[in-house]
């Protein structure tokens, strides 16, 4: 449901769920900041990006950002980003010949809570996955939204990607390295010192190279210090995703976490009449949290997504 003007939202009219306004309304510059009251929850950067839009900042309830954008060692690591390979084109890296995610229009949406419309997410609804020469291989409808954190004790968002072949293409081949997917580069103080945990502690995973591992399970979490105080970040896999997540993890020489689809071993073919639909949750707590608290939030996240609080 699109096309509500910002002025209309302020009149007290009864609105259905997901009214949208242009992202530029009430915002400045090439980014959208989604807030819970006066507290920023996440920032989505969509303008002045040479290769891909992404979530630049994600804050704990106490206001601690744990994402790092374009560090000197890997300039193509953009905080929280989604990228894969399509038909031989690399959309993860950012060098000559790589693909670009070209956004069309970004719209903010909201829900009605307690008689007020809360702007709690955004749609980047017309992303074109283009080759370096400008050919569109695929299109994506993307949405990122926060969930009401007051009863959850954590910041929580859902990332939703719906990827399909561009018009006129019979199919696309989705492939990539063992870390391609929804990836998260963490702030420098979390490098080398943190601890990963997974839903199934008995699942040993596998070592890929050095400190890099692939793990299975419904969630994966990492705890490490920011400004001398521990924070915990977790990623959740939705059971209806086309494949169970393989979590890519590393702590050395820097901390990274990705939700991957095992594409380096099993590429995916998406036909013209199909859509690759992916939903992942990302949560952040102040302090360390145990597996039960993560499990409880994971269960709550599934309810929020499946009952209709979806982008």
Image: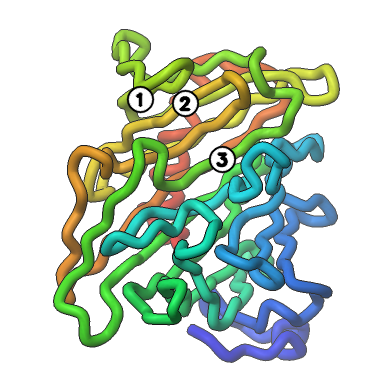
Sequence order check, earlier mark of 1 and 3 = 3
Find the distance from the CA under tag 1 to the CA under tag 2.
6 Å
- Above or below, 109 against 10 in this view is above
Q: Provide the secondary structure element on which disc 1 rests.
A: strand
Nearest the eye: 198 or 8:
198
- Above or below, 145 against 26 in this view is above
Q: Provide the secondary structure element on which disc 3 rests.
A: strand
Q: Left or right: where does residue 76 sit relative to residue 196?
A: right
The crowding category of the residue bearing disc 3, from other C-alpha atoms within 10 Å (few below 14, some 14 to 19, many at least 20), is many
The residue identified by callout 1 is 214
Q: Provide the secondary structure element on which disc 2 rests.
A: strand
Residue at 47% x, 26% y: name it: 249
The answer to the question of whether label 1 and label 2 lie on touching residues, with beta carbons closer than 8 A, is yes
The residue identified by callout 2 is 249
Q: Left or right: where does residue 198 sit relative to residue 44?
A: left
The residue identified by callout 3 is 184
Residue at 27% x, 85% y: name it: 167
Is residue 111 visible in this depiction of the protein?
no
């Amino acid at each position: 449901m699109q096309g509500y003007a910002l002025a209309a939202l302020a009149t007290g009219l009864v609105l259905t769920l997901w009214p949208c306004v242009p992202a530029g309304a009430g915002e400045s510059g090439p980014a959208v900041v989604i807030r819970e009251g006066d507290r920023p929850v996440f920032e989505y950067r969509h303008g002045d990006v040479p290769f891909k839009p992404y979530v630049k900042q994600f804050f704990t309830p106490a206001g601690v950002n744990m994402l790092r954008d374009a560090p000197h060692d890997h300039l193509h690591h953009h905080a929280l980003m989604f990228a894969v390979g399509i038909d031989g084109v690399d959309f993860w890296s950012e060098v000559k010949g790589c693909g670009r995610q070209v956004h069309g229009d970004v719209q903010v949406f909201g829900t009605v809570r307690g008689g007020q419309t809360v702007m709690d997410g955004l749609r980047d609804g017309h992303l074109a996955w283009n080759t370096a020469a400008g050919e569109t291989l695929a299109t994506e409808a993307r949405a990122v939204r926060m969930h009401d954190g007051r009863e959850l004790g954590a910041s929580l968002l859902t990332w939703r990607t719906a990827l399909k072949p561009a018009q006129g293409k019979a199919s696309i081949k989705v492939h990539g390295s063992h870390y391609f997917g929804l990836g998260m580069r963490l702030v420098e103080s979390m490098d080398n010192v943190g601890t990963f945990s997974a839903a199934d502690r008995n699942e040993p995973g596998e070592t890929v190279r050095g400190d890099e591992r692939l793990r299975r399970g419904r969630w994966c979490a990492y705890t490490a210090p920011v400004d001398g105080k521990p924070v915990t970040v977790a990623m959740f896999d939705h059971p209806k995703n086309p494949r169970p997540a393989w979590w890519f993890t590393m702590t050395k020489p820097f901390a990274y976490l990705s939700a991957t689809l095992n594409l380096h071993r099993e590429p995916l073919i998406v036909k013209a009449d199909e859509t690759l639909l992916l939903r992942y949750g990302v949560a952040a707590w102040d302090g360390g949290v145990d597996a039960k608290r993560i499990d409880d939030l994971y269960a709550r996240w599934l309810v929020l997504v499946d009952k209709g609080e979806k982008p």
